[in-house]
Image: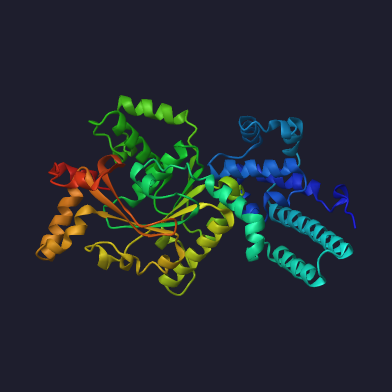
């Protein structure tokens, strides 16, 4: 049986209208459409490319109109794959977004028909060649039909011998792609192979978990990674102003400029230089501002950006406990969210960092898995579990009473810089470890250091430091 690919079912005109609709009204239907179809559902290769670019622009915060799409194709060197006149002709095909869902489902249905025909051809070819048994042909066909029916990725079930014969080398080579990935924190890079996986980070108050993760993603983006920060709590202005404050501090360590001050309109000459440099940068770090979106809606937004499994993005979710859920208890809702995040991470090969809060009862205790007790079954699902705490929390047993403990914690919070201990509680990529940082909370800046740097340290406490606390 031979299938002529040129005569396969297609909905080319519908594809054109759908792409046109996606470029209207600042891309208001991009999220909806991307929750229904993938780039591979389009029949024409140029439509697949345009779809990917529209999604990339939209989730980076750029309205995906036809001019922006053209500019992005030109920047990536792919404009020759799409005729410019053809691209601009698309915008004349649709003047409303009202039919976008219908169009997307029509494109999806046609793609499904093509896959059914391709599967039927494989069945006929296998049956005619007498190479495989009917039982094996039926089993493979059933798996394929299940995938088409549920729109899932290929089954991961693999025979022992087949894996070593066919897949082992390819999967090792894929992991090697991440061997040179660096977070920019030298101590963390020396201890952790930062491969794709689900990373969970929790912290005691004042340990700077949001600042740490934002700085981590920015440093990865500076090294060429695509990074996405999904924020349920902070606005894009709050996050980007952290970057400004940190860079000004690095260039002018005596500055008094803070992120909060920048948002109030405080100014310095160095700030102008930093803003100009940031405006001209190629740092691929974007913010996805969220409020009422469920984890399913969030993952639908991320899916188009994670289509390249060879170099999927680094994604941070801030933070787990405030993701809306319909489950009857918070813990069950968190369990459900974490399972979905892990499945998405595994299916797309992303590196997913999830920020989690601690139990309030553990705020005055050294961190352990007990600190995550109200955060679902994180210790089972996560590949790596990090905990951030004030370094003095390691010495709590030496303090006399709760009043003394609270006073010392308050003193540690007022230090500039604060002494922070990152404790790895679980690591599927290797052994557990400890890292230490100076945290200049006034300037949203973490600097790696050694544990010995904290010994006999006489912090310069100042009453004005309280103004800098996040």
Residues 326 and 442: in front is 442
Q: Taking the image as drawn, is residue 95 in sight?
A: no
Q: Residue at x 73, y 40 (%)?
A: 46
398 versus 10 height, above or below: below
Identity of the residue drawn at 75% across and 47% down: 15
Q: Please indicate, yes or no, whether residue 76 appears anywhere in the rendered image.
A: yes
> Which quadrant holds the N terminus?
bottom right
Residue drawn at x 50%, y 65% as measured from the top left: 339
Image spot of residue 245 (x, y percent): 32, 36
Q: In this view of the protein, which residue sits in the foreground, 452 or 18?
A: 452
- Give me the residue at 50% from left, 32% from top: 282
Q: 346 and 329: which one is in front?
A: 346
Please provide percent x and percent y for residue 53.
63, 41
Question: Is 246 displayed left or right of 79 in the figure?
Answer: left
Image quarter of residue 220: top left
At which x and y percent is residue 141? 77, 66
Please give left or right for residue 269 compared with residue 220 in the image.
left
């Amino acid at each position: 049986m031979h299938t002529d690919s040129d005569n396969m079912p297609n909905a080319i005109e519908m594809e054109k209208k759908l792409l046109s609709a996606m470029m209207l009204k600042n891309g208001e239907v991009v999220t909806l459409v991307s929750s229904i179809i993938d780039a591979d559902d389009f029949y024409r290769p140029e439509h697949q490319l345009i779809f990917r670019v529209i999604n990339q622009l939209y989730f980076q915060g750029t309205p995906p109109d036809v001019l922006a799409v053209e500019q992005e194709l030109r920047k990536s060197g792919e404009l020759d794959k799409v005729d410019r006149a053809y691209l601009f002709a698309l915008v004349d095909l649709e003047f409303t977004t009202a039919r976008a869902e219908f169009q997307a489902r029509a494109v999806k249905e046609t793609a499904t028909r093509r896959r059914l025909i391709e599967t039927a051809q494989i069945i006929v070819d296998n049956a005619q060649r007498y190479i495989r048994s009917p039982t094996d042909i039926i089993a493979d066909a059933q798996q394929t039909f299940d995938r088409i029916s549920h729109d899932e990725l290929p089954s991961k079930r693999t025979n022992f011998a087949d894996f070593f014969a066919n897949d082992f080398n390819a999967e090792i080579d894929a992991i090697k792609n991440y061997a040179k990935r660096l977070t920019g924190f030298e101590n963390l890079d020396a201890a952790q192979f930062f491969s794709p996986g689900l990373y969970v980070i929790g912290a005691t108050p004042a340990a700077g978990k949001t600042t740490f993760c934002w700085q981590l993603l920015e440093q990865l983006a500076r090294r060429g990674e695509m990074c996405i920060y999904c924020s349920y709590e902070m606005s894009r202005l709050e996050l980007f102003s952290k970057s400004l404050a940190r860079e000004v501090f690095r260039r002018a360590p005596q500055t008094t400029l803070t992120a909060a001050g920048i948002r109030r309109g405080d100014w310095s000459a160095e700030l102008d230089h930093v803003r100009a440099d940031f405006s001209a940068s190629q740092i691929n770090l974007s913010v996805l501002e969220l409020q009422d979106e469920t984890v399913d809606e969030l993952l639908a937004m991320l899916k188009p950006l994670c289509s390249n499994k060879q170099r999927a993005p680094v994604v941070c979710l801030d933070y787990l406990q405030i993701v809306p859920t319909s489950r009857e208890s918070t813990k069950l809702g968190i369990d459900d969210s974490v399972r979905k995040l892990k499945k998405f991470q595994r299916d797309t090969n992303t590196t997913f960092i999830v920020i989690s809060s601690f139990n309030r009862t553990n705020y005055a205790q050294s961190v352990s898995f007990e600190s995550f007790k109200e955060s679902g079954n994180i210790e089972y699902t996560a590949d790596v579990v990090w905990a951030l705490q004030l370094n003095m929390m390691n010495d709590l047993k030496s303090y006399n009473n709760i009043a003394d403990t609270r006073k010392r914690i308050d003193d540690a919070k007022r230090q500039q810089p604060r002494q922070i201990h990152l404790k790895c509680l679980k690591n599927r990529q290797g052994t557990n470890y400890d890292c230490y940082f100076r945290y200049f909370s006034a300037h949203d800046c973490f600097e790696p250091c050694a544990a010995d740097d904290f010994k006999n340290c006489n912090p310069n406490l100042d009453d004005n430091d309280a103004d800098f606390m996040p």
